[in-house]
Image (cartoon, helix red, strand yellow):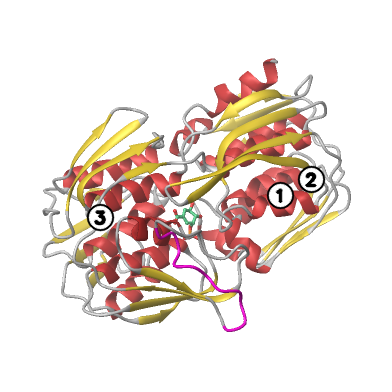
Amino acid sequence: MKFTKSGSGLRGEITVPGDKSISHRSVMFGSIAKGITEIRNYLQGADCLSTISCFRAMGIDIENKGDVVLVHGKGLHGLIRPEQVLDCGNSGTTTRLISGILAGQNFDVTLTGDASIQKRPMKRIIEPLSLMGADITSVKDNGCAPLRISGRPLHGISYTSKVASAQVKSAILLAGLYADGETRVTEPYLSRNHSEIMLNYFGADVRTELPAGAPDSPRSGSRESAPASASPVSGVTAVIQPADELHGGLVEVPGDISSAAFFLCAGLMVPGSEILIKHVGINPTRAGILEVVRNMGADITLMNEKKGSGEPTADILVRHSCLHGTVIEGAVIPTLIDELPMIAAMACLAEGNTIIRDAAELKVKESNRIAVMAENLTAMGADVTETEDGMIIRGGKPLHGAVIDSHLDHRIAMTFAVLSLCADGETEISGAECVNISYPNFYEDLQELTKR
Ligand code: S3P
């Protein structure tokens, strides 16, 4: 697919599709809850459709009517053994979270996914789930999918994860629902807490413990209280009690801040832009990009702040801004991990240097996002040095079009479609259709804003 420089600013209003993380969880948790879960604004991207098909294969009736999805949950012990291998497609969230649920069932199952999923690290869930008593093996003995899981009686553990990963934390918490005692997961920094919020909303007992000296955290996401911690802190523990049953309910999925990030950055980068991005999820464990772009000098305003199903939302007004470099490191990293490719590309247009550190997790996403970003940004004329755990970007070099290899990574394709708006000449992106993983109408929506 080919792209050219934008002749004028991006202007208008946009509503981005539903949050991918919250969509996955609503179908998973709805399936193992009693009663009907009504999900509004479910993301119809390929990843979330993989989650629906996995639970259908385990006997759950899921009506997908487009914007509304109805899950007829069968309770914690209502899943049945699938007749075939479960196909998680390109979705790490499906693979890892489902493993936590499958660990506690009374049947065995094999799950796998596409070529990218079969290269992504699964030891990070195999180890803690095995400690809980699960029988889970990597079929090729390489620490990756396909995974063979035989459900077993589980016991609670106290586990310290080396990485701040919501997928690891959530897999352990889900297995903890089936355990014979309390389960604790400590991570170096607070990762996205959508599982804690939604599990509490469905009646589980999950709480977040902050290290001594940190401000008090409410029971995350209980029907009455606000989500945990306004800013990420070191050494955070999620604690779950075994559950008798969960109870489904109404889930209103906010717009995905990871999708909004492309328009947020496009608006900041392209001169003459003014965009209103409506109804975006701004859970503090996801909203690090807002802090970082403000540090870079961005003109953004949050309006119409609300809270639905325990998740805060806002409209974001963004105007073209003159940006300067910044340092992105430490506790903020898990709160913007999926936005780093777009932020790195935007930093090429900023004045001065941007340094990204502590982001080695980028290497084990849908592609090695450090290597792929460095390679593609360099092809467009940017001055970028790849490091062990991030990148150094020396901003302000003139950019030109190039042939970009997306490596079939949706966020890489979208990042370069946006960056091409600021580059002289033509940019050609290979595998551009992979955006259907998280944002099927991305190119149409981007074009709509450039027409006004
Ligand atoms: C996700 C967690 C993050 C993120 C991914 C979605 C989730 O992954 O990158 O896109 O829904 O829990 P990690 O848990 O591997 O950091």
Per the rendering, the mark at residue 376 is none
Residue shown at the point (40%, 54%) measured from the top left: 92
Q: Is residue 2 magenta-colored?
A: no
Instruction: Please tell me whether residue 122 is drawn above or below residue 215 in the rendered image.
Output: above
Quarter-wise, where is residue 270 in the image?
Answer: top right
Calculate the distance from the C-alpha at mark 1 to the C-alpha at mark 2: 7 Å
Mark 2: is the Cβ under 8 angstroms from ligand 1? no
Amino acid type at image mark 1:
Ala
Q: Is residue 218 magenta-colored?
A: yes
Calculate the distance from the C-alpha at mark 1 to the C-alpha at mark 3: 34 Å
Q: Position of residue 35 (x, y in %)?
A: 19, 47
Q: Secondary structure at mark 1?
A: helix
Amino acid type at image mark 2:
Cys
Overall secondary structure of the magenta section: loop
Instruction: Please tell me whether residue 438 is drawn above or below residue 335 in the rendered image.
Output: above
Tell me the residue that label 3 is attached to. Answer: 111
Residue shown at the point (43%, 41%) measured from the top left: 253
Q: Is residue 405 visible?
A: no
Tell me the residue that label 1 is attached to. Answer: 344
**For this view, does 38 lie left or right of residue 106?**
right
Tell me the residue that label 2 is attached to. Answer: 348
